Amino acid sequence: MIEDSAHKPSWLKVKLPKGKVFNNIRRMVEGNSLVTVCEEAMCPNRGECWSSGTATFMLCGEVCTRACGFCATRTAKPKPLDPEEPQKVADTVANMNLTHTVITMVTRDDLKDGAAAHVAATIRAVRKASPQTVIEVLTSDFNGNTDALAAVMDARPHIFNHNLETVERLSPIVRFRAKYRLSLQVLQRALQMAPGMVVTKSGIMLGLGETRNEILQTMDDLREHGVTVLTMGQYLRPSPRHLPVIDYVRPEVFDELRDIALSKGFTHVASGPLIRSSHHDANFRPEESIMQAITADLRARGEL
């Protein structure tokens, strides 16, 4: 086992965040009292992404009701939802002139709908403020609440993302309360709730002790449930209280796994040591048929 006290390999070194654009975005986010997963999850790409004018917004507060073994987000009793948050996010997206935005959330098991209505309201607010923006949501499993998931899908995100995080064997250790098979069902149901109008996406971390065969099986499981976009990145230990890194996976292995995933039918794969679920998302855009189907549906409902 590789202990975190050892020097990280050279391919995991990143530049410190800096620059005028980075600082402007920080001021904009802080001025609107917004939370970004970039900072809360200690993402290694936040300097690069913020400096290029992109950010991933995290809804529902700064604390989570689960205590997953990999996650840097704090676990505590959460505060009430901010009813102004959807509009604050929408205004920030519009001011940043984003072509692609990711809206994620802390898990809110304290709420009956898991904050699904809040997420849906944010999607609608962003679409109204910035119609050209591709909207991706990265949600919890809502404890399998089908009505909650339906509320999010009814708001018509372009991309629905829900991460498996790891292989099935390690899931009980890595993900508190979340279940591997339930996550697969959530992804499949999301696709079924918006046929022809959404892309489903998931991601896994490597370096937690998974085997190659387990990674390949996870790919097969995702494809069997309709997922076409996959991210794979290196797990980095946020603190000594979190799960240890078992292995630092070399970049060429990530490249090989990307090629295998593409051969299995994934249409878009981001795979590399520093890849995170929303990293470089601007490089991916859903097929035009999906974009047109969503637009037609929203116009029919009077939402455009």
Image: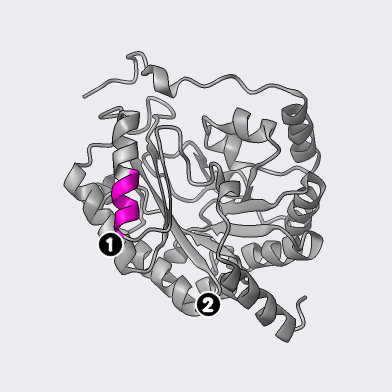
In the image, residue 22 lies at what x, y percent? 72, 29
Q: Choose top left, top right, bottom left or bottom right for residue 30.
A: top right
Position of 18 relative to 191 (above/below) = above
The tag on residue 194 is: 2
Q: Which residue is mark 1?
A: 221
The residue depicted at 58 percent of the width and 73 percent of the height is 289
Mark number displayed over residue 266? none
Instruction: Find residue 16 and report its image quarter.
Output: top right
Can residue 73 be seen here? The reply is yes
Q: Where's residue 68, x and y in %?
A: 39, 44
Predominant SS along the magenta part: helix
**Looking at the image, do the residues carrying marks 1 and 2 touch, with CB atoms under 8 Å apart?**
no
Single out the residue that lies furthest toward the bottom: 300
Q: Residues within 10 Å of mark 2 (few under 14, many from 20)?
A: some
Q: Nearer the viewer, residue 17 or 76?
A: 17
Q: Amino acid at mark 2?
A: Ala
- The amino acid marked with disc number 1 is Asp
Name the spot of residue 144 as percent of width and height, x first.
41, 69
Tell me which label, 1 or 2, sits earlier in the chain. 2
Front-most of 270 and 204? 270
Magenta stretch, residue numbers: 258-264
Secondary structure, mark 2, is loop
Q: Is residue 207 among the parts visible in the rendering?
A: no
